[in-house]
Amino acid sequence: MGQRRKDRQLALQLLFSIDINPTPIKKAIDNFMLYFANSEPTDFFLQIVNGVSNSYSEINDLIKKASKNWTINRMSVIDRNILRMGIYELIYCEDIPAKVTINEAIDISKKFGTKDSGAFINGILDKINKEKNNTEQPDN
């Protein structure tokens, strides 16, 4: 398993923890790394966790717009945090191809989510990616 996959999985676990037990991000990272990860945080891990945290409202708004018949609170904690990470990468990590981001999110959802998580996450991330690409195209 590559380092970025490990970082994504650790980020998911931390974001899950913060979602069910709101804690200031700095304290959450310090405690998580000390008690669960038993290591120093990598730059990519910190980028994801801080990026999702700093863009939380914007990311949640994108989830709301893209998810018909699902409120964020009805989604599983795992699914909504995988979505948050994926959306952060799609919007802010221009060095990562969208296809890689979406595939990583699906693979992580297969490990941590339910049997339906992959299709659910794929649908929402694909929709957001298509809308992002449509807004980036210049008008002719």
Image (spheres, rainbow, N blue to C red):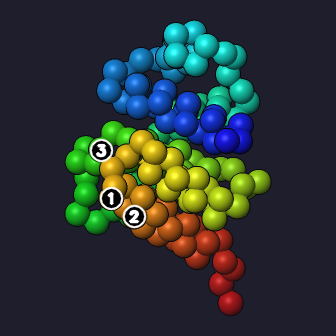
Q: Residue 122: where, in percent of width, then height?
A: 46, 63
> Is there a contact, CB below 8 Å, between mark 1 and mark 2?
yes
Q: Residue 41: where, in percent of width, then height?
A: 67, 22
The C terminus, quarter of image: bottom right
CA distance separating discs 2 and 3: 14 Å
Q: Amino acid at mark 1?
A: Asp
Secondary-structure class at tag 1: loop
Secondary-structure class at tag 3: loop
Sequence order check, earlier mark of 2 and 3: 3
Q: Amino acid at mark 3?
A: Ser
Q: Amino acid at mark 2?
A: Ala
Q: Is residue 59 visible?
A: no
CA distance separating discs 1 and 3: 11 Å
Residue at the (25%, 52%) spot, across then down: 71
Q: Residue 90: where, in percent of width, then height?
A: 60, 56
Disc 2 marks which residue? 119
Q: Which mark is residue 76?
A: 3
Residue at the (51%, 21%) spot, across then down: 25
Disc 1 marks which residue? 116
- Mark 2 Cα-neighbour bin, 10 Å: few <14, some 14–19, many ≥20: few
Q: Is residue 129 visible?
A: yes
Residue at the (34%, 55%) spot, across then down: 115
Select label 2 or label 3 by which is in front.
2
Select label 1 or label 3 by which is in front.
1
